[in-house]
Image (cartoon, grey):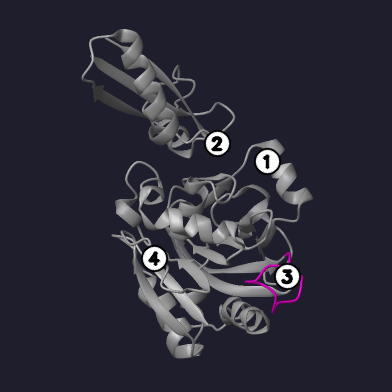
């Protein structure tokens, strides 16, 4: 299978995602420049972390106008799996491919640390290898990861089981002190209604090797690799 | 014509920057400043002399780009 890693001006986790797919999971991987419109035969598209277009105006706001995004949208509408990581998640929100918006972290500080995440749903292509309730330890690095959705949207997200990961303590218990940014309902990751588009603030690509301090991010890549193998 | 677009977080959305600024003002002794909401301000110079047209154009770009309707609202002045 082929991972397509979209590169925007200002992306800075593209090489990490590419490395995880290519070197660790032995899959084909392609960089896709944001001005292109061809997804180069990608079976899965990753929108990586970084500061696309300098994050001017709002995080992810300019990236949605990049030419590649109409191809990504069409790919997602055909059911293609799309993963937005950190800035990639913000881009998916601004593009309307996922519901909601990001606010400045409650603390107003850029938070760069490991967090604990409880897997809420495993019927997405990016969490299928996990058990519901399983706790993952994966790093975050963001200043605007305070997920917000108005009450009616939030209700719909919960009713449709679209919350995929929540910030918890190491035992999977919710607690305000374990929520690094103030996200409503401690939301760290969501999916769209058809469940093929997932956005997550934590960085699984930074947690695939023991050398980097943890391997829990492998679960995300293992999920998609085994999902695609049976398709 | 010039259009001025003021974008602010909706009243229902917590504004941590505004809160921090208000706290700073309080510590400086400005206790009568009850609340601060931080926002963004845009000046659009438009190639039109029609106020209605200018307003319509500013509204369109505010909806499409300048504001995120999930969290923000905006106000437009035209002159």
Closer to the eye: label 3 or 4: 4
Residue under label 1, please give it. Answer: A153
Which quadrant holds residue A223?
bottom right
Please give the label number shown on residue A38: 4
Q: Which mark is residue B70?
A: 2
Q: Residue at x 63, y 63 (%)?
A: A196
Does dot 1 land on a helix, a strand or a loop?
helix
- Highlighted magenta segment, given as a residue range: A120-132
Of all chains, the one bearing label 4 is A
Tell me if residue A131 is in the magenta stretch.
yes
Q: Position of residue A22 (x, y in %)?
A: 44, 86
Where is residue A97? Give x, y as percent. 55, 51
Q: Are marks 2 and 3 in contact (CB under 8 Å)?
A: no
Dot 1 or dot 4: first in sequence order is: 4
Q: Residues within 10 Å of mark 1 (few under 14, many from 20)?
A: some
Instruction: Residue at 52%, 56% (x, y): give it.
Output: A74
CA distance separating discs 1 and 4: 33 Å
Q: Does the image show residue A149?
A: yes
């Amino acid at each position: 299978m082929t991972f397509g890693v979209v590169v925007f001006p200002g992306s800075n986790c593209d090489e990490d995602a590419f490395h995880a797919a290519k070197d660790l999971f032995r899959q084909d991987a392609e960089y896709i420049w944001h001005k292109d419109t061809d997804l180069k035969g990608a079976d899965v598209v990753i929108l990586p972390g970084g500061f696309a277009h300098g994050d001017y105006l709002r995080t992810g706001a300019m990236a949605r106008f990049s030419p590649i995004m109409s191809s990504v949208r069409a790919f997602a509408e055909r059911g293609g799996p799309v993963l937005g990581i950190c800035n990639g998640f913000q881009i998916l929100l601004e593009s309307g491919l996922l519901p909601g918006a990001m606010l400045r972290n409650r603390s107003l500080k850029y938070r760069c640390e490991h967090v604990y995440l409880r897997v809420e749903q495993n019927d997405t292509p990016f969490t299928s290898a996990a058990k519901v309730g399983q706790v993952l330890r994966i790093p975050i690095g963001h200043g605007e990861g305070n997920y917000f959705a108005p009450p009616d949207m939030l209700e719909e997200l919960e009713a449709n089981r679209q919350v995929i990961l929540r910030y918890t303590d190491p035992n999977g218990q919710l607690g305000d002190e374990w929520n690094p940014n103030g996200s409503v309902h401690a939301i760290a990751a969501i999916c769209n209604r058809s469940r093929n588009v997932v956005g997550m603030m934590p960085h699984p690509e930074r947690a695939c090797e023991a050398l980097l301090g943890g391997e829990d991010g492998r679960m995300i890549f293992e999920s998609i690799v085994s999902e695609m193998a049976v398709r | 014509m010039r259009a001025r677009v003021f974008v602010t977080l909706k009243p229902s959305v917590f504004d941590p920057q505004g809160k921090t600024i208000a706290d700073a003002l309080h510590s400086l002794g400005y206790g009568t400043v009850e609340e601060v909401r931080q926002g963004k301000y845009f000046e659009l110079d438009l190639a039109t002399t029609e106020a209605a047209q200018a307003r319509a154009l500013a509204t369109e770009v505010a909806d499409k780009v300048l504001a995120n309707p999930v969290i923000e609202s905006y106000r437009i002045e035209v002159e």
